Image (cartoon, helix red, strand yellow):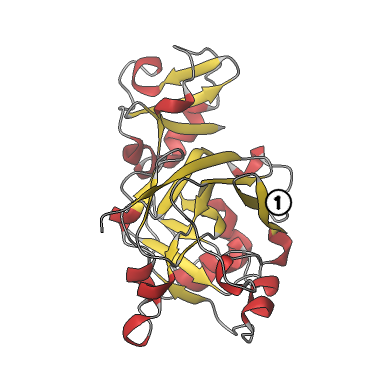
Amino acid sequence: MKIAQHDGRLVLVLDGGVADVATASDGRFGPDPTAAYDDWDAFASWAAGVTDPTGPLDEARLQNPVPRPRQVFAIGLNYRSHAEESGMTIPDVPATFTKFPAALGGPFDDIEIVGGSVDWEVELVAVIGRAADRVGEADAWDHVAGLTVGQDISDRALQFAAGMQFSLGKSRRGYGPMGPWLVTPDEVPDRDDLGLGCSVDGETVQDGRTNDLVFSVPQLVAELSSVLPLLPGDVIFTGTPAGVGMARQPPRSLQPGQVLESWIEGIGTIRSRCVAGPT
């Protein structure tokens, strides 16, 4: 199953178009994507039987499939390849920070370039369906509604200012594009081993696989839910593979006019145009 936010409304993405959820369900489920996560089991059960579109798919009208998460978790140094290129020791526990929810954006939104150190980080993003509180690793996938493509866009100057302020440096407006839709784990080829990457103006700069994760999606759900409850619709940016601009010699950063494209096997592709931010 694929779900999306299309022109501000919750839809199912089907072959040949989209099914508007409120219309197809005769109002049983509303148009707000957030409500679907709050009633995930009932929604998923109903959606599995929907086969007929109610309208065409227009990619230009797609928005963030998880528009208002209550909690956003992000994990640093969670690919062995990225830890190696950063010259850092692989952590014993997930290196967790947050991207503030107001920083999230849609799959084809522009990215404002502020300063000269804005970097790319393609990431697999997991979204919680059933609430998870002290969940064991073996049961963790049962609490994941689906997976989507994300970019943890990072203002490195802001990130490393004042003794490191990761969350603020990764939370400028629109610095968390997500989409193009949310795919349930049973839709992807192998939920524990997916290819992912990104390109800048057509040049591939990241190319990895999620089997290189230090902490897998189930391990992250178990670890995080041991500390606090994970709520329906919560978002987990699971980390980025090698190839970030900061680690290159010489370092590289995104520039106005460039196009950043990011993809994950079995999920889809998002694309952002870089535009000059305020001076």
Identify which residue, 36 or 155, lies in the foreground. 155
As drawn, the residue found furthest toward the left would be: 279
**Residue at 52% across / 25% down in the picture?**
13
Which residue is disc 1 drawn over? 194
Residue 228 appearing in the image:
no
Crowd around label 1: few <14 · some 14–19 · many ≥20 (10 Å) = some
Q: Quadrant of the C terminus?
A: bottom left
Identify which residue, 108 or 231, lies in the foreground. 108
Does 105 sit above or below residue 46? below
Does 163 sit above or below residue 155? below
Q: Secondary structure at mark 1?
A: loop
**Residue at 68% across / 41% down in the picture?**
188
Name the quadrant containing residue 35: top left
Q: Quadrant of the N terminus?
A: top right
Kind of residue at badge 1 = Leu
**Residue at 42% across / 66% down in the picture?**
116
Name the quadrant containing residue 162: bottom left
Position in image of residue 184 (x %, y %): 57, 41
Residue 81 appearing in the image:
yes
